[in-house]
């Protein structure tokens, strides 16, 4: 099983970028992890559905045949332990899994329709940089839970 994080845009805040990098590096100790950033659309005269669609096409190209987990506030909510159990099961089933994080305008309809699952990282909408940090930290935490390491307490 390989994990992938596909996200719209690069973190603009250097402190957030450093924290994201730190947790993605930590998570990679537990999971084969690839991270892909796609270009963010600028707000222009195009409507938001068109902008989401363009970003969504870029994301689809990056994830390939991996099962898509759309990070969406309306998705399934897990405790850290439940998430670790789910991720462990995915590893046993040898599913390549791509966690997809949309940009400022959210995820495209195409991504949401192709998603095998929608995952809520929080009950509220998060800026995409924070969503990526939360996901990276939870991937790291899930690895420590599965190995019985003390981080998650």
Image (cartoon, helix red, strand yellow):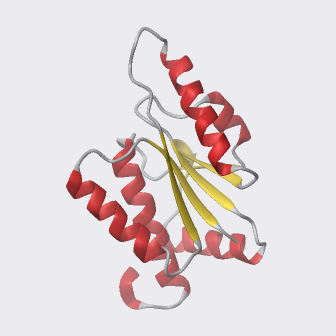
Residue 150: x and y in percent read 39, 90
Q: Who's the residue at 71% across and 63% down the image?
A: 96
Quarter of the C terminus within the rendering = bottom left
Q: Quadrant of residue 84?
A: bottom right
Residue 112: x and y in percent read 65, 37
Q: Who's the residue at 39% across and 80% down the image?
A: 152
Quarter of the N terminus within the rendering = bottom right
Q: Is residue 39 above or below residue 80?
A: above
Q: Who's the residue at 69% across and 44% down the image?
A: 115
Q: Quadrant of residue 20?
A: bottom left
Q: Is residue 150 above or below residue 98?
A: below
Q: Is residue 153 visible?
A: no
Q: Is residue 72 above or below residue 14?
A: above
Task: Report the side of 118 relative to 132 (left or right).
Answer: right
- Count numbered badges in the picture: 0
Q: Is residue 136 visible?
A: yes
Residue 119: x and y in percent read 56, 51
Q: Is residue 81 above or below residue 114?
A: below
Comparing 103 with 144, the one in front is 103
Q: Who's the residue at 33% across and 70% down the image?
A: 22
Q: Outermost residue, top direction?
A: 45
């Amino acid at each position: 099983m390989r994990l992938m994080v596909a996200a719209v845009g690069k973190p603009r805040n250097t402190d957030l970028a450093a924290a994201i990098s730190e947790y993605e590096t930590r998570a990679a100790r537990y999971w084969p992890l690839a991270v892909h950033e796609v270009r963010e659309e600028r707000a222009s005269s195009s409507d938001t559905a068109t902008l989401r669609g363009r970003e969504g096409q870029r994301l689809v190209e990056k994830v390939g045949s991996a099962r898509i987990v759309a990070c969406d506030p309306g998705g399934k909510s897990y405790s850290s332990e439940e998430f670790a159990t789910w991720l462990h099961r995915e590893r046993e089933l040898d599913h390549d899994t791509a966690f997809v994080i949309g940009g400022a305008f959210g995820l495209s309809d195409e991504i949401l329709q192709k998603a095998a699952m929608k995952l809520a990282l929080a009950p509220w909408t998060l800026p995409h940089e924070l969503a990526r940090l939360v996901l990276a930290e939870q991937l790291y935490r899930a690895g420590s839970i599965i190995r019985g390491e003390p981080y998650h307490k």
